[in-house]
Image (cartoon, grey):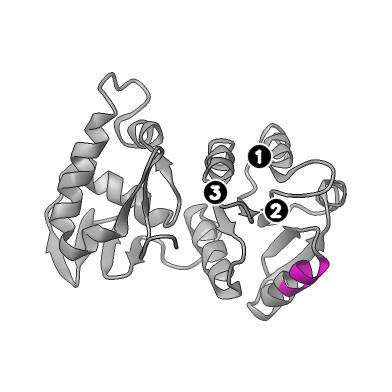
Amino acid sequence: MKQLIYCVEDDLSIRELIVYTLKISDFEGLGLKDGNELFAALDKNIPDLIILDIMLPGKSGLDILKELKADNKYKDIPIIMATAKTSEFDRVIGLDSGADDYLSKPFGMMEMISRIKAVLRRRGNDNSDSNVLKYKNIEIDKLKRTVKVDDKEIDLTLKEYELLLCFVERPDIVFSREQLLEKVWGSDFLGESRTIDVHIGTLRNKLGNSGEFIKTVHGIGYCLRDSDGK
């Protein structure tokens, strides 16, 4: 059975293009123009994933996201937010509210499909092998807990490994220092956020030229990108 993806987007041309791309990519797609249509559709079928635009008429995508995550029937549905805003603010708010990933408009259809598959793999809703993660020339084997760059294994500490895993699992996602501290060190960690900067520095050095992929987002934190502004 094909996996069902809901696309909540008020722009008809974008909505139709997304649904068409989903169908030719072996998914079942359903386009919805706002929150009312989404919740009506959810009463009939629970999708495998939702692509949710932030700027919607009536309830915003962020409000809808929070409502979904507060409802036991819907809280486990993977959600990718779509936004045309250049500010990192809505992206951070969306991730803090439970979104799995985001797409910045305008985005390519193949990028969208790639992100959908990545989210489904992380959530265990995909039959493909998710134990080996790759980003450019970086490869992580989660079962062996090994990291290779250009097929050469590199030696990382546990914290460096877990930081890199955060980034590779969610490329282009901006993590605040506080988010990274909680994910890697735990919510009961009493140290300073400067700890993150030190570990990022050593991780970059060990990755060699690939360390350039770990970008500093001034005023917020870090993310994994292949070039500035992308």
The kind of residue on which mark 1 rests is: Lys
Q: Residue at x 43, y 54 (%)?
A: 170
Circle 1 sits in a helix, a strand or a loop, which is it? loop
Instruction: Assess disc 2: are there few (<14), some (14-19) or many (≥20) residues with their C-alpha within 10 Å of its C-alpha.
Output: many
User: Which stretch appears magenta?
Assistant: 12-17
Identify the mark at residue 203; answer none if there is no mark: none
Circle 2 sits in a helix, a strand or a loop, which is it? strand
**Residue 176 appears in which quarter of the rendering?**
top left
Could you tell which of marks 2 and 1 lies nearer the N-terminus? 2
Identify the mark at residue 100; answer none if there is no mark: 3
Percent across and percent down for residue 173 are 45, 51
Disc 2 versus disc 1: distance between alpha carbons?
Answer: 17 Å
Q: Is residue 184 above or below residue 81?
A: above
Could you tell which of marks 2 and 3 lies nearer the N-terminus? 2
- Give 74 or 191, whichever is nearer the viewer: 191
Circle 3 sits in a helix, a strand or a loop, which is it? loop
The answer to whether the residue labelled 2 contacts the one labelled 3, judged by CB atoms less than 8 Å apart, is: no
Q: Is residue 230 left or right of residue 137?
A: right
List the residue tagged with mark 2: 53
**Residue 179 appears in which quarter of the rendering?**
top left
The kind of residue on which mark 2 rests is: Asp
The kind of residue on which mark 3 rests is: Asp
- Give 124 or 194, whichever is nearer the viewer: 194
Instruction: Assess disc 1: are there few (<14), some (14-19) or many (≥20) residues with their C-alpha within 10 Å of its C-alpha.
Output: some
211 is within the stretch colored magenta = no
Percent across and percent down for residue 144 are 23, 56
List the residue tagged with mark 1: 75
Q: Is residue 42 left or right of residue 152?
A: right
